[in-house]
Image: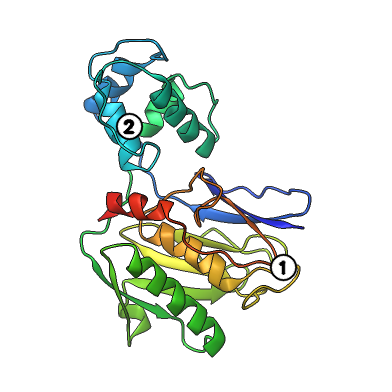
Amino acid sequence: MSAVLLNSVMEPEVSHLVSCIFLFLLIPLLPPSNSSSFQFVKQFTGSKKGDNVRGLQEIRNYLQKYGYLSYSYSKKPNYFDDTLESAVQAYQLNYHLNVSGTLDTNTLSLMATPRYTKWSKFNLSWALQPSTSHDVQGRIAQAFSKWASVSHFNFSKGKEFTHADLQISFLHRDHGDNSSFDGPGGVLAHVNMPPNGKLYFDAEHWAVGAVPGAVDIGTVGLHEIGHLLGLGHSTVAEAITYPFIPAGVTNDLCPAMLGIMKNLS
């Protein structure tokens, strides 16, 4: 069975994998540019399991906020325990860093980088580009309804595509954003995360529902809408934002998303 790789990267690249299709996702990040970011990195560099580090609760809060810890409270907030190590490793794995569990410079620098991850409002309009087929419209509408059921977001279908908060397009090849599509079997989609809600699908290949050897637009749409709302990739295999989706199947939201969505609400 082939699988779709939904890979979160920070620089454009195409990864050719055996029996896999690569989906490129842009996550907007800005480089750290102030002294507080430098101090953050300096304070925790080299921290590892077994260490007692003043202010380590900041790391716990960060990892809980972005879904790597189920809760940040600890009776010993400055003690680097097994749970914190596992969360750091999951974070490093997700961002293709050295999975050591140690707070090294690269890991802390990324944590100190400002992220566009939240909307300032909960009522969002969405629209598909004109001429989108009815069956695809139905699958995307279902995806928004599912996200509404597990979050505080309210979604309404906008009448004007250009005025919608979330704009969804199906485009071919070079479409003017320096992230060209490359046809069947290559890049599937990419998004702009909050507050720039644009989702671009490659127009050259999609299926509606579970079709052998093909990719379901509803499943990938559900995945990508999660990114539009501010979610990164998950290390939980059952989560819709997990980086891999098998071809020929459909997938849905799992209970784990209920807790994660609280961080965006």
Residue corresponding to mark 1: 184
Q: Quadrant of the C terminus?
A: bottom left
Instruction: From the viewer's perspective, tell me whether residue 247 is left or right of residue 104.
Output: right
- Where is residue 120 shown, x and y percent of the image? 21, 59
Q: Is any atom of residue 43 visible in this view?
A: yes
Q: Amino acid at mark 2?
A: Ala
Instruction: From the viewer's perspective, tell me whether residue 153 is left or right of residue 84.
Output: left
Residue in the foreground of this view, choosing between 235 and 13: 235
Q: Residue 51: name its quadrant.
A: top left
As drawn, 51 above or below 189: above
Residue in the foreground of this view, choosing between 110 and 221: 221
Q: Amino acid at mark 1?
A: Pro
Residue corresponding to mark 2: 112
Q: Residue at x 33, y 17 (%)?
A: 44
Q: Tell me the SS state at disc 1.
A: loop
Q: Tell me the SS state at disc 2.
A: loop
- Where is residue 181 shown, x and y percent of the image? 62, 64
Q: Residue 214: name its quadrant.
A: bottom right
As drawn, 42 above or below 87: above
Q: Quadrant of the N terminus?
A: bottom right
- Where is residue 179 shown, x and y percent of the image? 55, 59
